Image (cartoon, rainbow, N blue to C red):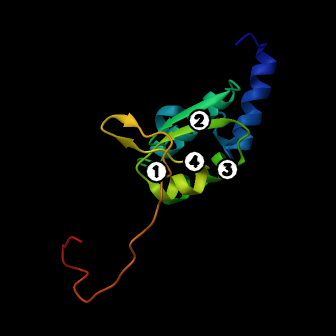
Amino acid sequence: MGHSKDEALRISRRVLDFLGLSAFENRITLKLSGGEKKLVSLATILSMDPDVLLLDEPLNGLDNNTRIKLIDVLKTLDVSYIIISHDIDFLLDCTDTIYMMQNGRIEKDTTVYTHSHDHAHLLGHLPHQH
């Protein structure tokens, strides 16, 4: 991206530190877990100082600790992002606006009302529908 080697190292170390990945600087990518690879991929993109991030199902395959870490990172970023996800709780936690797709189109000028159905009953361990 036109940076000197020293500047590129400074940028990459700053981003790794921001993501809590300082110890990853000399690790071999092939030996990282799936979640670690996703975080290193995010570090790669963030080091390029993007204007916008497009994240497609970023929590897929992540363990709970890595999910929490990624959510915390997204909340502190000073960059716009678009997230495609089926995880409504994640979207509510990380975004200001949620749009839904219907019939292959993004629904515009529509308010999305999110809600949950928490309930309990004696036969909850049996498969059922509501």
N-term mark: 4 or 1: 1
Marks 2/3: CA distance? 14 Å
Amino acid type of the residue that numbered disc 1 sits on in the rendered structure: Leu
Residue 43: x percent and y percent? 63, 34
Q: Around disc 1, counting alpha carbons within 10 Å, would you say few (fewer than 14), some (14 to 19), or many (20 or more)?
A: some
Marks 3/4: CA distance? 14 Å
Q: Quadrant of the C terminus?
A: bottom left
Q: Which residue is mark 4?
A: 97
Left/right placement of residue 58 relative to residue 104 reads right
Label placed on residue 42: 2
Instruction: Give the residue at x 26% y 81%.
Output: 124
Q: Which residue is situated farthest in the top direction here?
A: 2
> In terms of depth relative to the viewer, which is nearer, 66 or 113?
113
Residue 25: x percent and y percent? 66, 34
Amino acid type of the residue that numbered disc 4 sits on in the rendered structure: Thr
Task: Relative to 127, say whether 7 is above or below.
Answer: above
Task: Relative to 77, say whether 41 is above or below.
Answer: above
Labels 3, 4: front one: 4
Q: Quadrant of the N terminus?
A: top right
Q: Around disc 2, counting alpha carbons within 10 Å, would you say few (fewer than 14), some (14 to 19), or many (20 or more)?
A: some
Q: Is residue 27 visible?
A: no
Marks 4/1: CA distance? 24 Å
N-term mark: 2 or 3: 2
Q: Which residue is mark 3?
A: 75
Label placed on residue 62: 1
Amino acid type of the residue that numbered disc 2 sits on in the rendered structure: Leu
Q: Which residue is situated farthest in the front direction here?
A: 109
Badge 1 element: loop
